[in-house]
């Protein structure tokens, strides 16, 4: 379970845990990740055949496949939207967090291992 919110809005983040990173996304309607659209899972549009168009931005992704700062995510979004094949919409820069305490315990199987 993760927490995601518009990084430009003033909301209480005291219980949302550690920030994993930032991502340009839509939260309303179809929901879209611009990052996934061209770098992680380029299924619908693809990018360039050589796979280098977004290399500079790809190199900035952290271990969670997110940007480390809101500014990096905004720079990527501006570059992404400069192409005529990209998805346009009501993007926000989302802050993605991992809650320290989950509201429900993780799934635990009652199965006994057979050895």
Image (tube, helix red, strand yellow):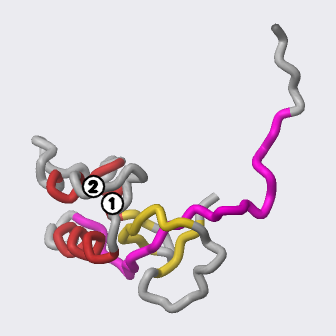
Residue located 23% across and 53% down the image: 58
* Residue 93 lies in the magenta stretch: yes
Q: Name the disc covering residue 38, or none.
A: 2
Q: Is residue 101 above or below residue 82?
A: above
37 sits left or right of 21 in the view: left
Q: Position of residue 22 (x, y in %)?
A: 39, 68
Q: Is residue 113 above or below residue 36?
A: above
Residue located 41% across and 65% down the image: 21
Along the viewing direction, whichever of 20 and 110 lies nearer the viewer: 20
Majority secondary structure in the magenta region:
loop
- In the rendered image, the quadrant that contains the C terminus is top right
Residue for badge 1? 35
Q: Position of residue 92 (x, y in %)?
A: 39, 79
| Residue at disc 2, secondary structure | helix
Along the viewing direction, whichever of 4 and 18 lies nearer the viewer: 18
* Residue 106 lies in the magenta stretch: yes
- In the rendered image, the quadrant that contains the N terminus is bottom right
| Residue at disc 1, secondary structure | helix
**Bounds of the magenta segment:** 86-109
Q: Position of residue 112 (x, y in %)?
A: 87, 21
Q: Are marks 2 and 1 in contact (CB under 8 Å)?
A: yes
Q: Is residue 112 above or below residue 75?
A: above
Residue located 27% across and 55% down the image: 38
Q: Is residue 102 above or below residue 90?
A: above
How many angstroms separate mark 2 from mark 1 (CA)? 6 Å
């Amino acid at each position: 379970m993760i927490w995601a919110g518009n990084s430009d809005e003033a909301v209480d983040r005291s219980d949302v845990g550690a920030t994993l990173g930032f991502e340009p996304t839509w939260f309303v309607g179809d929901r879209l990740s611009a990052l996934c659209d061209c770098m992680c899972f380029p299924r619908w549009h693809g990018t360039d055949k050589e796979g280098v168009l977004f290399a500079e931005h790809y190199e900035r992704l952290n271990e969670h496949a997110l940007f480390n700062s809101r500014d990096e995510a905004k720079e990527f979004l501006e570059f992404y939207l400069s192409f005529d094949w990209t998805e346009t919409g009501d993007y926000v820069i989302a802050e993605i967090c991992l809650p320290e305490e989950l509201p429900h315990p993780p799934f635990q199987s009652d199965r006994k291992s057979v050895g």
